[in-house]
Amino acid sequence: MQGKDLLQLAEQFGTPIYVYDAEKIQSQYNRLTKAFSKVDKLRINYAMKALSNVAILKLLKEMGSGLDTVSIQEVLLGLHAGYEPDKIFYTPNGVSLEEIEEVAAMGVQINIDNLSILEQFGTKYPNVPVCIRINPHVMAGGNANISVGHIDSKFGISVHQLPHLVRIVENTHMNIVGIHMHTGSDILDIEVFLYAAEILFDAARNFKNLEFLDFGSGFKVPYKKDDIETDIEELGKKLSKRFNSFCAEYGKDLTLIFEPGKFLVSEAGFFLAKVNVVKQTTSTVFAGIDSGFNHLIRPMFYGSQHYIENISHPKGKERFYSVVGYICETDTFANNRKIAEIKEGDILCFRNAGAYCFSMSSNYNSRYKPAEVLWIHGEGHLIRAHETFEDLLRNQIPLPETVATV
């Protein structure tokens, strides 16, 4: 997409606004499938927590994607978007047995990540196909909050608990069809990924009737010019060869599954916000925008850096700005960042805003959530309207007058 296209959308739909480029999502999906074209059975399950708009789900469905979900609500959204139950994986953490039972009854593939629930579920439903999530005890990822495969992580069943896990399976006679792992996000070193894969292979040898191995995801995408990223093509060559070798050893062609979220949608996303005020202090020039961490929390939560461009005047002389929001907290998107000269009313564009941006938004300070637009075939289509005051009140219930009086 070009800056002029984004400016047009900001004018047409107003700010703040998220824009997603369908062509970029398609190219990322094709890049991943091409990298693993040597594997006979490959399945991509989009991790919808990254961006769960139904229009995006339908777009990925047309590409052939399945879904990776982490809540019953995401499962319901996937079904609403037209996915068949057998195309949806459910990988929750810390949920009740009752929620897992409800999802399993829908025909969705469940993935259990703790011994207690595994034993309870296996005892009650020994014939229901189950995947097991293991914790490989591999420290990977670009931030402590997104490293989920280390020894202190709440996710997965420890590889050191495999003997106990196997006993539960043998005692309940439950139907284990897959083994899963996810070490973290923003994994750059493919050797770390390959090392974790060997742990997954070792775990898989304990089960004789597997249908698939799920390697999670966590591929790093570039966030700024000349930034480094996961070499998907090199990973494809090395892991495909090793996976095919394992299948030959196992005596069965298993399905290789990935569950990318950020890799598919991050670079496709743009967040547009208008500059409300330019404020000069004794040491800093602040550009205050019509948004805050209620719309884009990643810089504050993960320390992530989103490239920020003044698309109203991209050729202007560069100056140093701290870009801040309108929330009554310290919501700073960038400190002393070089950006083309900013004036009040300019439109700033935050890149890599497709993953974990809108999906983590809130109504903090009673602010409205922004709109979402899908750019497809050279046109912008509104796929979520700006919220209104009525949306803030929708689920609030006034007390009766006789009770409200103190």
Image (cartoon, grey):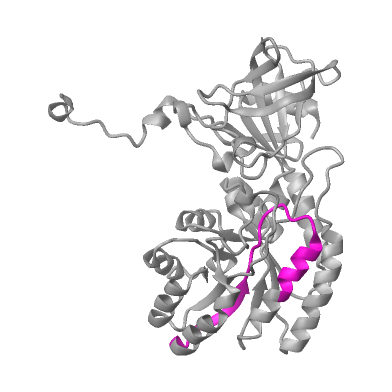
Question: Quadrant of the rendered structure where residue 366 is?
Answer: top left
The answer to whether 289 appears left or right of 319 in the picture is left
Residue found at x 49% / y 84%: 169
Q: Looking at the picture, how far across and down is residue 405, in whole percent?
A: 15, 24
Up-down relation of residue 81 to residue 38 (above or below)? above
Q: Looking at the picture, how far across and down is residue 325, in whole percent?
A: 59, 24
Up-down relation of residue 105 to residue 69 (above or below)? below
The answer to whether 379 appears left or right of 397 in the picture is right
Is 208 in front, or is 186? 186
Q: Quadrant of the N terminus?
A: top right
Up-down relation of residue 82 to residue 180 (above or below)? above
Q: Looking at the picture, how far across and down is residue 152, in whole percent?
A: 56, 61
Stretch of the chain drawn in magenta: 172-198
Residue found at x 80% / y 38%: 224
Is 41 in front, or is 225? 225
Is 78 in front, or is 134? 134
Question: Quadrant of the rendered structure where residue 359 is?
Answer: top right
Residue 192 lies within the magenta run: yes
Q: How many marks?
A: 0
Residue found at x 56% / y 57%: 82
